[in-house]
Image (spheres, helix red, strand yellow):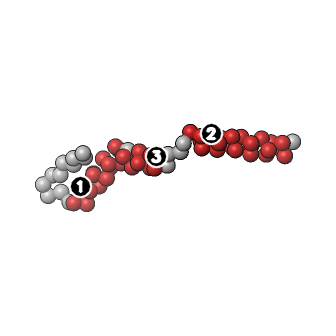
Amino acid sequence: MIIVQVKEGELIERALKKFKRKFEKTGIVKELRRRQAFQKPSVTNRKKMMKAVYVQQLRTVED
């Protein structure tokens, strides 16, 4: 839980800015995006193989 100390008379925009900064530092959004984009290891390996084949074909065309 994120707690933001607000001084008396402080503008709400400033308090909101503090909250956003603290929220960003926790890395919650990054973690959520990383989990949403989860790929099975087999898919990851297949993509690596496809990339390796593509790069190898480019190199043979260059020569």
Q: Residue at x 36, y 46 (%)?
A: 28
The residue type indicated by label 2 comes to Asn
Real-space CA distance between mark 2 and mark 3, rounded to the nearest whole angstrom: 18 Å
In the rendered image, is residue 39 in sight?
Answer: yes
Counting every numbered tag in the picture gives 3
Residue 45 lies in what quarter of the image?
A: top right
User: Which quarter of the figure is the N terminus placed in?
Assistant: top left
Q: Which mark is residue 45?
A: 2
Q: Left or right: 34 with respect to 19? A: right
Q: Residue at x 25, y 60 (%)?
A: 13
Disc on the earlier residue, 1 or 3: 1
Q: Which is more toward the observer, 54 or 5?
A: 54
Q: Amino acid at mark 3?
A: Arg
> What's the CA distance linking mark 2 and mark 1?
46 Å
Work out whether 38 lies above or below 12. Answer: above
Between residue 50 and residue 6, name the one nearer to us. 50
Residue 19 vertical placement versus 55 (above, below): below
In the image, what residue type sits under mark 1? Answer: Ala
Q: Residues within 10 Å of mark 3 (few under 14, many from 20)?
A: few
Q: Quadrant of the C terminus?
A: top right
**Which callout, 2 or 3, points at the residue further toward the start of the chain?**
3
Note whether residue 30 is visible: no
Horizontal relation, residue 48 to residue 10: left or right: right
Labelled disc at residue 34: 3
**View extreme (left): residue:** 8
Classify mark 3: helix, strand or loop: helix
Which mark, by number, is residue 51? none
Rate crowding at label 1 as few (under 14), some (14 to 19) or many (20 or more) other CA atoms within 10 Å.
some
Task: Give the residue number, with chain letter if any, for mark 1.
Answer: 15
Q: Nearer the viewer, mark 2 or mark 3?
A: 2
Residue visible at 59% across and 40% down?
Answer: 42
